[in-house]
Every structure is written in C-alpha cells, then in structure tokens.
C-alpha cells in the first residue's frame, strides 16, 4: 500500500492478511513524520488518517438575493402563488356563504314576558306557609322557592279587610297578623335577588263571600283600589291579582279601564295583571280573557273531576285556537278551591304536575303542591318543611319519603320547563285522545322535542302515536311509572304502553 493513497476514513483495520505478506511499517519507522501513523499488532494494521477540513456554506449575500429575486422566473412564481392564495381564500368564503344560505334558518323567538318562562307559586295564607307565621318567614324560604324554578310569587291578600265592614277596608295597610310593610319590602328585595317577581293579591273582600262586597259597593271599592295600586306598585311589586274580575269589569267598565292602565302601562319592565274567575267552560274563559284584557286568567277549566281526557283536549284546543299561549294559565287548585292533592287525590299529584308543566301556557301552583300537601279542615293547611328532618319509623317515615320523591319530581319537571324551548313556547300538536288517554307533541324549530302522554283510566292503554315529525323511538325523561317506564329507557312510539293513572314525558332530538 502506498503512503500517498488517500482513504476516506479515520481508522482502517486490515484483518486476515495473507501469511506471505509482511507487516507494513511506517510513520516514525520510516522517518516520515508527516505520514499517517501505522501500528502493527498480531497481523493487523491500524492506519490513522487525518480528518479533512469541512467547507462552511455561507449562503447568498444580500446583493445576490436581490439580483436573483428580480429575475423573470421568480417574479412569475411569486405572482402565481399570490393568485393561488387569493383564489383559495375566495373559494373557502364562497363555501361558507353557501353553507349558511342552504342551512335551515332558526325561527324567531316569540315575544314573551317573564311569567311565561316558569311556574307561578301562590301563597294565599302567609301564616300557614311560614314557620314564623309572618312575611319575614316567607323571605327566609326564598332560597327554597328558587330551587323550584318559580318565576313569580303570588302573595296574599294581606291587607286589612274586616268582615262586613266596608268602611274599615284599607288596601294600603298590611294586617298585623302577617307582618308589616318593612317585612314586605324585605321579601321583595330577597325575591328579586333570586330573579323571582312578587305579585300582590288585592282582592278587596277576600274573607267574605263576594270579592267586591256587593254590587252597590263595587264602584266605591274600585275607586279606592286605584290609589292603592299606585301605592303598592311604588313599593316594588311586579303585578296585581284580583278575584271576581267579571263583576268589576262589567259593572264599572271605565274604572276597570283605569285599573288596567295603572298596572299594565308605564314601565319598561312589564307588570302583570292576573284575574281569577269561577268560570269553568273554555268558551266562558275565552270570552272573559277578551273582555277584561288581563294578562293571565286563573279558572276552573281543568278542575272538574268529571272531565274526560277528550274534554281536556278540547278545552286546551279551544283556548289555543282563540288566544296566544302566552295569555293562557293552567291551574287546578287555588286559595279558595284548595290544594292539588285534595282535588285530584295524592296518588295523582305527580300526574297533574306533569300536565300543568307541559301544556302551552303558564302553570300556576298552590303552596305545598310540590310535596302533595292536602287540605285538612280548612283550605289553608300548615306547610311542611324538611319532610325527612325528623327521625320517624313506619308509616310516618314512608309518607315523608313520598313527599320528598314528589318534590324531586316537581323540581325535575320545572327545570325542564324553564330551559327547554319546546316546553316554554313550542307548538302544541295533538297526537292522541280518548275518554281516558291524551298525548301531545311539544316542539320548537331545531330544539329537542317532547311527547307528553297521560292515562286517566283504571285500565292500561297502548297508544299508537304517529306523526310526520315523530321518530320510531323516544327516550323517557320523566315518568310516574319508575318500573315500566324508567328514566333514560327507550320506548316505541307506535306501541306506547301506559298503566292506569300513569303519565310519561318522552324526548327525541331534532333531525333535519
């Protein structure tokens, strides 16, 4: 091997040399200090070759870059890339516009008032409702009422109105039996902090048989009421409730027009005027809604025990055909008629809670309806708080557990009613009705849809529900039958089985 041979490596090991060849020597042995160093051991030669110096690339100078960039080829390339970028951007923009144009448009939310977004809660007897038997006790329970998702409290009547003593009637003075003005103001402030509005019942003669005393006295009472309305609205109440509106509106129509103007006009935050009537027919309720101009009218339209499911379906349909659902209120019990559990039976309380909370309109409940509180010897039973607070055994404990279950059922439905657009203001579509069963669809635009089904009968029924907007199956949201219709289970809408006295709320998504 020549000394001048250049090898591109640092170490070269020569193994398995022919025995005839003599080992090479070099380096110092040959007196050549500049040659690669070779060492010999056991027939192997290691050659040390110096590393070559790497050439460092410095790139183009500024002048060279500018000279190259100005050549026709690079100019054309830059223009081509710029045009491609803008064409791609315009293409994406056109695609986005096409998607927006072709997508189904959302329906405009209908005009609604605060009382259309959830249930109203009536406290007709402050002493029975409150542990302390006064308005301060009501204030202490605002957090509990907020958990029920109620949008308004109907308080009273609480003004001074002695029996058979028209001269002592004082709309602007709170009866000492229930508290004072400062307590009432505190209640309003606490309620407003929880987004709950306060409605004051100013029915003049609430302890007597006739709400406006006599026909002769209606004019006098209505005139005195006008100044009282201004007083209470200035205290911060959000609305007024009056019973017997058909009498005052027909006897003194001019004064009734003044009463309406005082309550319903003049503020950015709309105030509500609620009327209460004993009328039970859909025709009578509809006529009174038109003639009085009240925002909501509480009636006995759904109260009669003799009503069939078909009667109820016709009542709802007749009222919806004549009025916007924002004008309709649904109630069964009230201050005068009593509580839900007494009127329909304790086993049917959850059933009727679902009915009121899924119909199109504002549901209205009496205090205690959420726990199936029943009337005793009066229409104002004492409210039961903390139903499982005490340690009890046997029947008493079972009853308290039932009340707690009823409360949970109410909360679940009320929360759905408050957040689901289909239940708040969705269309009402009848699906089925017979003498014992009723089913309807609530839907709004692209929101989730709900089917509510009820069986008032003593026998099980199978509903064959069909409609172009219905899927084959739906999911159970809330049910009075936890065994056969458990929450989150799916059921076939073409063969929906309901046991006697059972109700179910089903949900399915919008499909484009």
Image: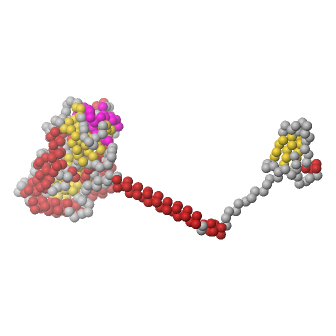
- Foreground residue among 262 and 418: 418
- Foreground residue among 85 and 277: 85
Using the rendered image of the protein, determine whether residue 347 is visible from the camera's viewpoint.
Answer: no
Figure check: 351 above or below 87: above
Using the rendered image of the protein, determine whether residue 24 is visible from the camera's viewpoint.
Answer: yes
**Which scheme is used to colour this image of the protein?**
secondary structure
Figure check: 96 above or below 346: below
Question: Residue at the spot x=90%, y=36% of the render?
Answer: 19
Figure check: 379 above or below 156: above
The quadrant holding residue 494 is top left
As drawn, the residue found furthest toward the front would be 72
Question: Residue at the spot x=84%, y=39% of the render?
Answer: 15
Question: Residue at the spot x=82%, y=45% of the render?
Answer: 12
Question: Residue at the spot x=19%, y=55% of the render?
Answer: 295
Position in image of residue 139 (x %, y %): 29, 52
Position in image of residue 499 (x %, y %): 25, 31
As drawn, the residue found furthest toward the left would be 216
Query: Which span is picked out in magenta?
Result: 484-508
Position in image of residue 301 (x %, y %): 15, 45
- Foreground residue among 158 and 94: 94
């Amino acid at each position: 091997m020549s000394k001048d041979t250049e090898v591109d490596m640092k170490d070269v090991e020569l193994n398995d040399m022919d025995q005839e060849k003599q080992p090479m020597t070099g380096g110092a042995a040959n007196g050549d200090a500049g040659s690669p160093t070779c060492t010999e051991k056991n027939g192997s030669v290691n050659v040390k070759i110096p590393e070559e110096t790497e050439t460092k690339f410095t790139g183009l100078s500024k002048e060279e870059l500018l000279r190259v960039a100005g050549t026709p080829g690079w100019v054309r390339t830059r223009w081509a890339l710029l045009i491609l970028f803008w064409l791609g951007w315009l293409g994406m923009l056109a695609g986005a516009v096409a998607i927006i144009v072709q997508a189904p448009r959302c329906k405009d939310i209908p005009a609604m008032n605060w009382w259309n977004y959830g249930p109203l809660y009536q406290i007709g007897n402050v002493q029975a409702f409150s542990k302390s038997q006064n308005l301060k006790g009501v204030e202490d329970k605002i957090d509990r009422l907020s958990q029920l998702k109620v949008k308004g409290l109907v308080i009273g009547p609480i003004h001074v109105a002695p029996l058979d003593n028209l001269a002592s009637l004082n709309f602007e003075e709170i009866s000492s039996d229930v508290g004072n003005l400062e307590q009432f103001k505190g209640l309003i402030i606490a309620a407003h902090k929880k987004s709950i509005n306060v409605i004051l019942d100013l029915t003049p003669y609430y302890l007597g048989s006739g709400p406006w005393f006599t026909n002769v006295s209606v004019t006098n009472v209505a005139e005195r009421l006008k100044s009282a309305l201004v007083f209470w609205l200035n205290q911060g109440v959000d609305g007024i409730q009056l019973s017997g509106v058909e009498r005052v509106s027909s006897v003194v129509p001019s004064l009734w027009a003044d009463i309406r103007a005082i309550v319903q006009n003049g503020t950015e935050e709309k105030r509500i005027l609620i009327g209460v009537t004993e009328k039970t027919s859909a025709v009578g309720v509809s006529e009174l809604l038109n003639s009085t101009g009240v925002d909501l009218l509480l009636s006995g339209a759904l109260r009669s025990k003799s009503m069939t499911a078909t009667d109820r379906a016709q009542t709802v349909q007749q009222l919806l055909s004549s009025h916007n659902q924002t004008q309709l209120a649904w109630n069964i019990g009230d201050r005068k008629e009593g509580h839900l559990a007494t009127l329909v039976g304790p086993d049917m309380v959850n059933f009727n809670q679902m009915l009121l909370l899924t119909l199109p309109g504002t549901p209205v409940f009496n205090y205690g309806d959420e726990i199936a509180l029943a009337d005793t010897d009066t229409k104002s039973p004492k409210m039961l708080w903390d139903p499982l607070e005490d340690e009890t055994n046997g029947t008493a404990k079972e009853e308290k557990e039932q009340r707690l279950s009823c409360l949970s059922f109410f909360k679940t439905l009320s929360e759905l009613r408050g957040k689901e657009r289909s239940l708040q203001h969705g269309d009402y579509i009848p699906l089925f009705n017979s003498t014992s069963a009723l089913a309807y669809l609530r839907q709004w635009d692209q929101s989730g849809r709900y089917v509510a089904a009820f069986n008032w009968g003593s026998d099980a029924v199978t509903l064959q529900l069909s409609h172009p907007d219905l899927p084959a199956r739906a999911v159970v949201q809330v049910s009075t039958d936890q065994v056969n219709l458990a929450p989150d289970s799916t059921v076939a809408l073409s063969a929906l089985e309901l046991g006697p006295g059972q109700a179910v709320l089903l949900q399915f998504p919008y499909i484009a």
